[in-house]
Amino acid sequence: MGIFNKRYKFTDKKLSRGGILSSLFVLIAAGLLYAGVYISYKADGNGGTNVGMLGAGAFLSSIIGFIIGIRSFKKDDVFLGFPWFGVVGNAIIWIFMAGVILVGL
């Protein structure tokens, strides 16, 4: 029947609060990172401490989000979409910011 063959799946699973919070930290870290890059671009690479503070904020936000995301995997009967997005997104931002910090040393 193709299009008209709808399958419903009933479950007791819920959205993970930790996963949603971890995903929110991805968005915060990405916003801070974007703001730092934008300010640095507009200042021709001379952003100063403002850009450094935004980068440090993105670095710390991604660490916190990663930890919250990892903890949300331990919950039973939750959907894992938000935790996966949060953990992977925070890990990518953390690795990028760690690279930026190491290049700056």
Image: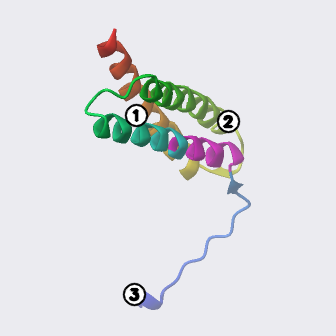
Which of disc 3 and disc 2 is earlier in sequence? 3
Q: Quadrant of residue 33?
A: top left
Label 1: state its secondary structure: helix
Q: CA distance from mark 1 to mark 2?
A: 21 Å
Which amino acid type is marked by label 2?
Lys
**Residue type, numbered disc 1:** Ile
Q: Is residue 18 magenta?
A: yes
Which residue range is magenta in the image? 16-26
Residue underneath mark 3 = 2
Q: Earlier in the sequence, mark 1 or mark 2?
A: 2
Q: Position of residue 94 (x, y in %)?
A: 44, 28
| Quadrant in which residue 19 is drawn | top right
The quarter of the image holding the C terminus is top left
From the viewer's perspective, tell me whether residue 10 is left or right of residue 42. right
Image coordinates for residue 83, horizontal then vertical, percent: 57, 44
Q: Which residue is mark 2?
A: 74
* Residue 92's disc number: 1
Which mark is in front, 1 or 2? 1
Is the stretch drawn in magenta largely helix, strand or loop? helix
Mark 2 falls on what kind of element?
A: loop
